[in-house]
Image (cartoon, rainbow, N blue to C red):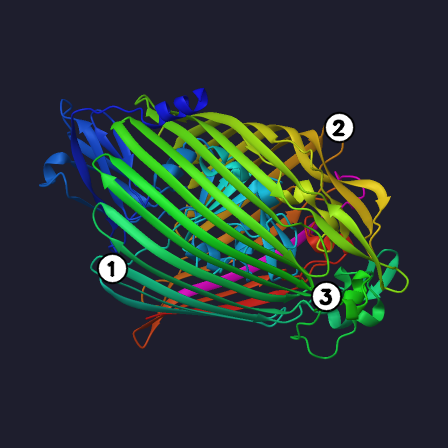
Amino acid sequence: MLRLLIITFLFFSHFFVLAQKFEGNVVGTDGQPLEAVLLTFHPMKVRTTTDIEGKFAINIDKQQKVESIEINHVTHIPQIIPISEFKNLNDIKIVCHEDVQTLSEVKVVSDNILSRVIDKTQPVQMVDKDFIERNSSGTFSGALAALPGVNTMNVGVGIAKPMIRGMSFNRIMVNNRGIKQEGQQWGADHGLEIDPFDVDQVEVIKGPGSLLFGPDGMGGVINIKENNIPLQDGNTIEYLSSYQTNNHAFSNSLEFKGKKRALFYSARMTHQDFGDYSVPADDFTYAGFELPIEENRLKNTAGNELHLSALIGLKYQNFKSSLRFTSFNQEAGIFTGAIGLPRSYNLRHNGDFRNVDLPKQRNQHHMLISNSYWRFGNQKLELDLGYQRNNRNELSFPGAHGIAPEYANSNLALGLHLNTYTANLRYEFNPNPNHQILMGGQFQWMENQRDGFEFLLPDYTSSQLGFYHYQLFDMKDQFILNGGIRYDRASHQINQHLQPVFDRGTLQPTGEMMERTPAFDRYFENFSGGLGVTYMATMKDHIKFNLGNSFRYPTAIELSSNGVHHGNFRHELGDRDLDIENGYQADINYIHQSEQLFLEISAFYAYYNDYIYLAPTGNFSFLASGGTMWQYRQDDALFNGFEMSTSYQPVSYFKNETVIEFVQNLNLNSRLALPLTPPPSIVNTFEFENFLSEGYRLKEEYLFISGRYNFAQNRTDRNERPTPDSFILNFGAGAHTLFFNQEFDFKFSVNNALNTFYFNHISRYRLINLPEQGRNFTFSVKITI
């Protein structure tokens, strides 16, 4: 009761001041809204920033006289405008001119207080649609791997998931338009069910985001923001098509969007079809056997996808509401050697490189999201509601799992069907121009049902409820302080599961039933908090320092699994007694940006109490083709590392970018590294932009060449192979042009241009010594009508 009283008191604590309101919008010379423009009101130096629509609103004490407004933006020319030039202080219009010394494609920006308060204390990077298109690899996660501190766990070329600072799975939260995406993300072979063509802007928050986003954000947050609303009434059609040579992948995406007064709407359809992908190798070695790779192509790694989305909404001055539906549908083959012991005869191609045969997976993710906000003067209320239906089906031959085919109803080995309901409520209040308060509540309820002749995870229901209170203070003298507290409760109700026993020799049922998981309930609660400070030494130099406590509840898979996880080539066993995982982090970030140089350095150190991970038991599985048995356990662990990103632009048309990243960890019990830790790497890129003189039909042209060196990873866990170093060369080009008064964007890139044989240490296929994708040419064209 005392806790509830404290939370209630904090939730409704605020005060009012007599103030004059200044509001308006900032746009570029093309009329497009500018996000994250810093406006400083002189002489009192009160600051605010514009949101995603270029709008701003701020209250200033009427006793303070405003003389001028200073406008600063990372890619536009600074300016100071006398207040006397504005006739209506409630409808201020500001136009910014682009600075030809634009330094970086990746910019630090924010659109609302939820993003801004994170930006005050942690490294946050924003990528836009152009960045995703330039770095496209067929998956949403693959494009993010170009960012410092971000890596990708691959399963072939059609499935990938992100890793931030050595953390992944349920420690990296994907916040999809305000709703945490749930899709069995605990599995290394489970990619993100997100259409890579249907994303306009993404914030990547490196470091703990549990305070504002929830427990699953303890390692980082990928915040997919709402797509941009057209500024003017009318309709637009966008068509994008691309082709990749390595696996002969065809991708086509068509979007229709428009706006009519307060009404806005859009619809998109994306189709991708890809064949077996190629690797620079003729054979591979697994379990002591040397096995062939015929024609350098991995059998049964083809697939196809169909994604749909639709959006409708209303937007007024103080109110906005939208309803969004998405449907992700994917069928992808699983490399034949991934289930059971691979044999040479199973790896032979039948001549059809686009055939999707068994074993394979069929994934569907349907999502319905409602986003709404209301403004009341200097207050704002936001409500996000979501429903998700995730269907994951793995199909295989029953005989490969030790079951006679006549005793299996179908080829469905493992079916996982997850329903998730989510509600997020946020309340923002600005008592005065230098003080912001954010309070919120989050609720989630999940139900998982299993199917198929295999068993890994039982039926269960889970719920989470959390409240947080956050405050930000602008001290005026170059310091910004912020901090907050959070309270959470969670529960798991695990159902008992009895699995039939089959004779290993005859594959016939013995008539016995084995209890693979008993019925049990687990309940958790936790308090956490964080503090941060930003020191703006100059307009060019900012330092952010953050201290925080993050946490994570054990998942149902960690508590109750008991079966072969073919995606990881092992038998995985849960532990029903696992406790909450707590982290204590320190993070410092330095940013310098001048006319020619951009420099960002981030360093982090974290101690985790009861860190949950899988460890080998030393025993073999009692199941057919189960391999060794691994069990979830807890030990204390340390993480530390840094990222450094520099961009030097001596002239307007040329820049050189260098990114260095390093992360290491230590299991304080075994004194060994934790598994799946990415190696240090250095990426250097030379890029030419807008180098053609006036008169050419090509505009916004660019040309780049990039080399990535991955150091050897020799710090490994028990039974984890070290990975040698590697060098990968990439290059590309692109331009915008008009043809018969029609806009076209062309892009061309080559990944792994030298066709290098190398391993990705965190790839699923590293476990069976399969190299990464070989040389791949990508061609794309975008037409906007």
- Position in image of residue 223 (x %, y %): 45, 46
Q: Is residue 540 left or right of residue 672?
A: left
Q: Earlier in the sequence, mark 1 or mark 2?
A: 1
Q: Which type of secondary structure does the marked residue at label 1 adopt?
A: strand
* The C terminus sits in image quarter: bottom left
User: How many marks do you count on the picture?
Assistant: 3
In the structure shown, which secondary structural element does the residue marked by tag 3 occupy?
Answer: loop
Q: Amino acid at mark 2?
A: Asn
The residue tagged 2 is 669
| Label 2: element kind | loop
x and y percentages locating residue 603 in the rendered image: 55, 31
Q: Quadrant of residue 391?
A: bottom right
Closer to the camera in the image, 391 or 106: 391
Q: Is residue 160 visible?
A: yes
Name the quadrant of the N terminus: top left
Q: Residue at x 43, y 26 (%)?
A: 484
In the rendered view, does 546 fall on the left or right side of 266?
right
Is residue 727 within the magenta segment?
yes
- Alpha carbon separation for disc pair 1 and 2: 59 Å
Residue type at the position of mark 3: Ser
Mark 1 Cα within 10 Å, few/some/many (few <14, many 20+)? some
Q: Amino acid at mark 1?
A: Leu
N-terminal label among 3 and 1: 1
| Residue stretch rendered in magenta on the structure | 715-735
Furthest residue toward front? 511
Q: Which residue is mark 3?
A: 396
Can you tell which quarter of the image residue 716 is in?
A: top right
Q: Which of the two residues, 729 or 199, is positioned nearer the viewer here?
A: 199
Q: Residue at x 81, y 66 (%)?
A: 399
Instruction: Name the disc covering residue 263, or none.
Output: 1
Q: Nearer the viewer, mark 1 or mark 2?
A: 1
Labels 3 and 2: the sequence-earlier one: 3
